[in-house]
Each structure stands twice: as structure tokens, then as C-alpha cells.
């Protein structure tokens, strides 16, 4: 039976975390909050680094989220504090343009991205003064989308504070776009699942147009998240944008080889659409057209018939201008292969054959190998953790999120979860005091959580 999707506005439930946030707000600003907004982090089950190429991904929201308590003020400023003392308090004037310094990312820039996105959407010339206390419990720089949860929360806060109303799909699209102010050219996965998630189900997220479809995960298995404890801040390094750029160049090369009009072609998913090819055919085309040796800039200019000026303004990003060599074959192989694995994962979940868990585990394992060897977005600690997870009873295990650190997600038969947690703890966390100290928030079972919402006092 079809059920209605959850509402964006809900009444406050009796919740300890919310009560603590309310107390923190009152200590900070005197009065009571007018409303609360919350946006969850996510774990991507499969489909890594393909959303910005236009392909579907398969994440679920996690229980950890970013909560904000908000009231309007008459000071002509946005006053922003965080319950975590590591994050400083700031005040931003509502009469000046919001400036985000990409070269020097700070925690509150993510909040300001969300504010700016809504401001631009509605053409608000002067924002109302807002006082806001934020409480986030998504582990930072761990591939669980703590930063997008903050952007989404801020977008929701700004919409409500300006008495505007938007659909969840619109909010997801605005927040995906405005996160680019921080300089990372991500796809829309994180913001989409943060808004469109529903408790109890993972989602296949398709793009252009943005469309979520429920994916029923198999009974008899649980998803366990484990952090390798290597931090990766994608806004502070160029790894992420280099991959985005490599995929754009590969798109142009494949389009060129097929005699397509290059205008408007920047995403790998556009090529099979244009030439009506399957993903398997695209994998063969990549082998035919692209060589595994890295491409120099000169070779790219020559093949595409473009100038160095065009290359640097149309294909590179601000933080990839220094890159001289690009691995196009490996990146395109990963993207088309991973896109096919997402579709297979969804179809196994839909058909639920008796060996579902094994089939899904195999797909997750193939995804990790492809991320590690072709996309080169893992790191030695993550690879070690994935190996340990497999030896400890996981049927499938893979890095999740951007990579280069952060978390692995493992699928574990439900009856093996306690022994799995024990074994991973013993092999990965306990031998290292720093990891051991982080274990509690680094190794946990995760069930599909609900999406972003505004909470009003009863
Ligand atoms: C980050 C980006 C996402 C996605 C993942 C990798 O989380 O924000 O859009 O590209 O990396 O799958």
C-alpha cells in the first residue's frame, strides 16, 4: 500500500538532544528558539563518484545529523554558535554580501552556503537577523556527509526564517548547487538523500530530473559503518576536483571519438544517451578510445582541438590549474562499471533471490576494488580496514563517500554482527591508542534513517 511521504514540518517530540540544544540556545542568546531544523548525514551503499557524472547512486540516511535551534533577531546579523567548543562563534552582517573564502575553509562556510543558496533562490536582498545554535553529531571528514548535512540544515533554516516554502526536491537541488560555493564540484547525492530519505528504506537517487525510488534492503543483513580514522577534508585538497575534471575530459574525448557535438557535454552519462549505447558498450568504447597511460595537457589540446586557455577555463576548476597529467581510461572505466553495479544492486534488492546477500556483497566488493585501483580514491588504512571487515564476517565491504580516508560500509549477516564488531574492534581499533580512543563513534550499525525536517514546539 502506498504511504504518503513524510512531511517537512513536524511537532517537537520529547527528545533529550533537542532539550539540550534548547538549553544551549537559551544560555547563548537569552530567549527560546522559534523553531528547529535538522538534516541527516548519509552512507552510500554503492555508486561512488558517479553522481557528478550524471549516474544514479544508492545511499541511505544515517541517524546522525545536524540540528539547529533558531530564532529571529533585530540586530541585522546572523549570529551562529556551535555546541561543540572546537567550532568558534561568528556574526555575519545581513546587509553585506555573504563571502565564502574557498582558500581557507571554515566550519561555518557550509552554513553560509545554505543561507546564500536560499537567498539567491528567492532574490532576498536583505536577510532577516537570525540567532542560531548548531549541534552536529555526524563524524566530521569521515565520508558520512557532515558538511552537506550542515548546508542542508542551513538551507532549511533560511527558508523557514524567511517564511518561504519549497519542496524537498527543490531544496535538495538548491543545496547541491550552493555547496559549490565552497569550491567542491560534488554531485547531488548527499543533499538529495538528506532531504528525500525515509526511515526504513535506502533510495536509488536518479538525477536530471532528480528522482528517489525506495530500495528495500534484504532481511537478514545489517550495514555496519567503520571509520578508518584518517580524516579527509575534500574542500581543503584538490583530489576530489581532479577526479571531476578527469571525468569531464574523458567525456570530451569519447564524444570526440564518436563525432558528437561537444557543446554542453561534460558528464560521462551524456555520451551513452547521445549514442544510445549500453554501459557494457561504453566499457568497450573506453578500451578502444582511451589509453591507460596518463594524458598530458598537450595531448588533450591536440585531440580536442582546444587552446590551453579554453582548457583551463572550460574544463579545469580553480584548484586544479596546476595538474599536468590526467588518467582518463581508468576513471571512465570506474564510472561506467560502477553505474552498472548500482543498477544490478537495485535489481537484486527488487527481485530478492535466495542468494541476495551474497550477490550484493560481491557487488560491494567489486566497487571497492574499482575505487581503489581505477579511481584511486582509497588509502592504505581504508584498504586495511576493508580487508579486516571481510575477514571478520562481512559479506561485502567498501569505502563510502569521497574516500581518501573516512569510512567503510560493510554488509554483515545479522546473526554475525556481534562477533563482527568484536573482531574489527580487536584487529583495527584496539592495537592503536588513537583509534581506540575514537572507537565508540567510529564503529556502529546503521539503519536507514529519516530525512531533513523542521520541528516546531507543540
Ligand atoms: C562526496 C560528494 C558526492 C559524491 C561522493 C562520492 O560526498 O559530495 O556528491 O560525489 O563524494 O561518491
Image (spheres, grey):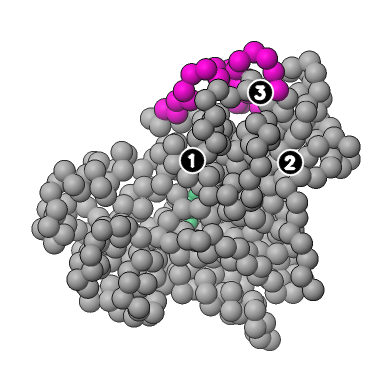
**Compared with residue 200, is residue 279 higher up or lower down, i.e. above or below?**
below
Query: Which tag, 1 or 3, sits closer to the chain's start?
Result: 3
Q: Residue at x 50, y 53 (%)?
A: 188
Q: 271 or 363: which is nearer to us?
A: 271
Q: Residue at x 61, y 79 (%)?
A: 348
Q: Residue at x 61, y 26 (%)?
A: 86
Q: Residue at x 40, y 60 (%)?
A: 53
Mark 1, residues whose alpha carbon is within 10 Å: few (<14), some, or many (≥20)?
many
Provide the residue span drawn in magenta.
72-101
Say if residue 454 shows up in the picture.
Answer: yes
**Compared with residue 352, is residue 400 higher up or lower down, i.e. above or below?**
above
Q: SS of the residue at dot 2? A: strand
Q: SS of the residue at dot 3? A: strand
Query: Which tag, 1 or 2, sits closer to the chain's start?
Result: 1
Q: SS of the residue at dot 1? A: helix
Q: Are marks 1 and 2 in contact (CB under 8 Å)?
A: no
Query: Where is mark 1, residue-wise?
Result: 178
**Compared with residue 192, is residue 436 higher up or lower down, i.e. above or below?**
above
Residue 201: x and y in percent read 70, 64
Query: Where is mark 2, residue-wise?
Result: 454
State yes or no: residue 203 in magenta: no
Classify residue 202 by image quadrant: bottom right
Magenta stretch: dominant secondary structure: loop
Query: Where is mark 3, residue-wise?
Result: 130
Q: 177 or 204: which is nearer to us?
A: 177
Classify residue 280 by image quadrant: bottom left
Residue 200: x and y in percent read 74, 63
Residue 414 in the figure: left or right of residue 358? right
Residue 149 in the figure: left or right of residue 37? left
Residue 163: x and y in percent read 68, 34
Mark 2, residues whose alpha carbon is within 10 Å: few (<14), some, or many (≥20)?
many
Amino acid at each position: 500500500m502506498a504511504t504518503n511521504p513524510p512531511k517537512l514540518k513536524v511537532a517537537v517530540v520529547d527528545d533529550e538532544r533537542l532539550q539540550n540544544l534548547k538549553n544551549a540556545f537559551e544560555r547563548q542568546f537569552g530567549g527560546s528558539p522559534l523553531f528547529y531544523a535538522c538534516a541527516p548525514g548519509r552512507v552510500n551503499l554503492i555508486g561512488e563518484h558517479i553522481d557528478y557524472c550524471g549516474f544514479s547512486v544508492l545511499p541511505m540516511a544515517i541517524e546522525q545529523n545536524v540540528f539547529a535551534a533558531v530564532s529571529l533577531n533585530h540586530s541585522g546579523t546572523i549570529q551562529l554558535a556551535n555546541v561543540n567548543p572546537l567550532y568558534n562563534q561568528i556574526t555575519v552582517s545581513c546587509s553585506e554580501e555573504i563571502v565564502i573564502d574557498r582558500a581557507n575553509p571554515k566550519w561555518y562556510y557550509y552554513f553560509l552556503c545554505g543561507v546564500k543558496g536560499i537567498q539567491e533562490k528567492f532574490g532576498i536582498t536583505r536577510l532577516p537577523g537570525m540567532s542560531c545554535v548548531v549541534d552536529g553529531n555526524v563524524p566530521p571528514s569521515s565520508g558520512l556527509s557532515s558538511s552537506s548535512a550542515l548546508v542542508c540544515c542551513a538551507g532549511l533554516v533560511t527558508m523557514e526564517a524567511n517564511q518561504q516554502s519549497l519542496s524537498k526536491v527543490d531544496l535538495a537541488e538548491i543545496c547541491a548547487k550552493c555547496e559549490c560555493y565552497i569550491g567542491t564540484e560534488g554531485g547531488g547525492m548527499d543533499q538529495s538523500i538528506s532531504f528525500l530519505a525515509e526511515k526504513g528504506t535506502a533510495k536509488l537517487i536518479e538525477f536530471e530530473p532528480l528522482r528517489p525510488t525506495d530500495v528495500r534492503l534484504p532481511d537478514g543483513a545489517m550495514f555496519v559503518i567503520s571509520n578508518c580514522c584518517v580524516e579527509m577534508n575534500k574542500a581543503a585538497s584538490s583530489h576530489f576536483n581532479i577526479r571531476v575534471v578527469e571525468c569531464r575530459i574523458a567525456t570530451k574525448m569519447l564524444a570526440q571519438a564518436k563525432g558528437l557535438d561537444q557543446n554542453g557535454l561534460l558528464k560521462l552519462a551524456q555520451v551513452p544517451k547521445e549514442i544510445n549505447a549500453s554501459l557494457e558498450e561504453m566499457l568497450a568504447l573506453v578500451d578502444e578510445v582511451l589509453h591507460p597511460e596518463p594524458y598530458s595537457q598537450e595531448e588533450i589540446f591536440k585531440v580536442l582541438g582546444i587552446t590551453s586557455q579554453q582548457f583551463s577555463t572550460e574544463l579545469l576548476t580553480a584548484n586544479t590549474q596546476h595538474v599536468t597529467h590526467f588518467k582518463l581510461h581508468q576513471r571512465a572505466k570506474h564510472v561506467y562499471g560502477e553505474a552498472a553495479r548500482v543498477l544490478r544492486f537495485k535489481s537484486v534488492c527488487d527481485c530478492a533471490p535466495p542468494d541476495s546477500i551474497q550477490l550484493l556483497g560481491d557487488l560491494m566488493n567489486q566497487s571497492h576494488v574499482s575505487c581503489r585501483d581505477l579511481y584511486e580514491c582509497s588509502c592504505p588504512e581504508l584498504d586495511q580496514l576493508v580487508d579486516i571487515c571481510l575477514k571478520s564476517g562481512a559479506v561485502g565491504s567498501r569505502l563510502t563517500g569521497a574516500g581518501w580516508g573516512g569510512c567503510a560500509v560493510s554488509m554483515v549477516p545479522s546473526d554475525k554482527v556481534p562477533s563482527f564488531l568484536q573482531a574489527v574492534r580487536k584487529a583495527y581499533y584496539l592495537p592503536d591508542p588513537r583509534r581506540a580512543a575514537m572507537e565508540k563513534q567510529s564503529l556502529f550499525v546503521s539503519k536507514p534513517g529519516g530525512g531533513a525536517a523542521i520541528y516546531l514546539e507543540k
